[in-house]
Image: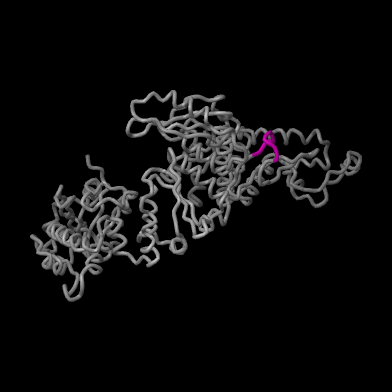
Amino acid sequence: MHVQLATDDLGTPLSEVTFVVVDLETTGGSPRQAAITEIGAVKVRGGQVLGEFATLVNPMVEIPPFIAALTGITDALVAAAPTLPAVLPGLLEFIGDAVVVAHNAPFDVGFLTHACTAQGLQWPRPVVVDTARLARVALHRDEVANCKLGTLAAYFRAPVTPTHRALDDARATVAVLHGLIERVANLGVSTLDDVRAFTSRVTSQQREKRHLAKGLPTGPGVYIFRDAQGTALYVGTSKNIQARVRNYFTASESRRRMSEMVAIATEVSPIVCASVLEARIRELRLIASEQPRYNVRSKRPASQSWIVLTDERAPRLSVVRAPKRDDQPAFGPFSGRAAAQDALEALAWVFHLRTCTSRLASARTRASASSASPMGCARFDLGRCAAPCREPIEAYQPAVDQALAAMSGDLRVVHASISQHMRDLAAHDRYEEAAVWRDRLADLLAVSIRSHRLGQLRVLDEVVAAVPTDPGGWEIHVLRRGGLAAAGTVGPGIDPRPVVDALVAAADAAPAGVLAEETAAIADWLDQPGVRLVRSSASLSMPLHCGGGLIAALATARRAAHAGVLATDASATAGRPTGPPLAMITRIRG
């Protein structure tokens, strides 16, 4: 059975590649100012025509006289033709995941990309082959006067003459494509990857290093580019190691730092993995340990921050790089210190926590100062600080308890307080400020979900989960304390239970210092459709009010606002907790 080409399979022989040759007729040369009047496409593989697609298109604008004279397509001819919205989905289905071929491809692909955007459709971003460019590289000037479609069709003795009609021109382009493939075959071009390299402006160093991909595994895993001293230059991962490494020596790799890396590399070390998840985890660990200089993350390690309550008589919130103890209540991780600081200020505002870092005075000193507000404390003057420097410590404790409850998974007070503040701001037409608080609330909810989503995995001694594979087998993973401890596969028709027992027995002990990115990758894998929970040392659960329903309320309000629905409380229509009147706010910052 034939399997159509995917981006990772650029090494597929050209005889096995499915091509869709496309040609368009338009009312002009710019997709922003002109419209499509006719589409022609021919699907071929191995020299055989598999199907054709052809239709006139009503451009809904007048066709210029010189275009009508050139193509023969007139206003009368397209009057009864379907419009582009009716035609485009059919063309995209016809293309599927095939390689798109066109003569002067930027023109045709530019029109199709613009049309998809205008119609709200997803352009599939296929691999594109330009026969005009291929001809300019493959043919000499003394062979053809130029690389126009008519000239090339005559040179390769195409059975169809280009007529400036879409299907005729597509058929002629098919003949030109086949002629060019035969021509470049003598130059060692036998795969789509070879074609892309042949027509690209890849450096000589890239061309010379193509041999590094030979013999690499074709399954999932990690690859490490190394220099002559064996030092890791770059670590990457792929579902197909060989196909991915081959891309570094083609036009698809345009990053300057990668070209520099390839010029230095002398070998590629593969690490075959049982699954894509194992490959991702090994990549994260290798980048952290090897610090390869061409991985962006190794130059700028993931900066993560947490919010904790300080260990003081009157605790305050503090941003730290990591909690000191596993049992220390912590909120995060945040993507960086700035995001954590912004969340800290929002939480301190909600719960009236102190933000000063000075040591508190003794009880006797506080009593003598009770008649005056804390010197220079604007937060106290605004009623946003419980002032443990002035009031008894016992009066401050409820604010600390509420903050601890929010960090532990109950954000109802945070949601209610910020929502009311947003209403007050909106009532005074201060929509910009309300939008800032809306974004702060959304960020707090999202981080809360992430915090408890990852936290539940870090405290579990063991989780065994599996996902079915396409052939009817299973990928099985053993997880311990938020890290990957073992991975394996089971083939079709094989009882997976003995394999599960063997993996559990051979799994690594609960790792220490697991990267947050590793736990996040595992959480994402667990959330994907089809994953089955085989066993767990404890139940997988999250706090009821940690943010899921609340953030859904915000999303409902956003959708309502963008749809033009002005509601006092858009979240109420979804049966979720009451949210702020965001219709006007999302117009400002949505």
Dominant SS of magenta comes to loop
Which residue occupies 32% across, 33% down? 471
The structure residue drawn at horizontal position 75% and vertical position 44%, both measured from the top left corner, is 354
Q: Is residue 149 above or below residue 13?
A: below
Considering only vertical position in the picture, is 286 above or below 256? above
Q: Quadrant of residue 400?
A: top right
Residue 255 as seen in the image, left or right of residue 298: left
Q: Nearer the viewer, residue 501 or 345?
A: 501
Depth check, front residue: 340 or 491: 491
Q: Is residue 300 left or right of residue 16?
A: right
Q: Is residue 386 magenta?
A: no
Q: Position of residue 393 (x, y in %)?
A: 81, 36
Rendered image quadrant of residue 322: top right
Q: Is residue 505 visible?
A: yes
522 vs 456, nearest the viewer: 522
Q: From this viewpoint, is residue 74 visible?
A: no
Q: Position of residue 575 (x, y in %)?
A: 48, 30
Q: Horizontal and vertical percent for residue 548?
A: 52, 34
Span highlighted in magenta in the image? 324-330
Position of residue 355 measured from the top left corner of the image (x, y, whole percent) = 74, 46
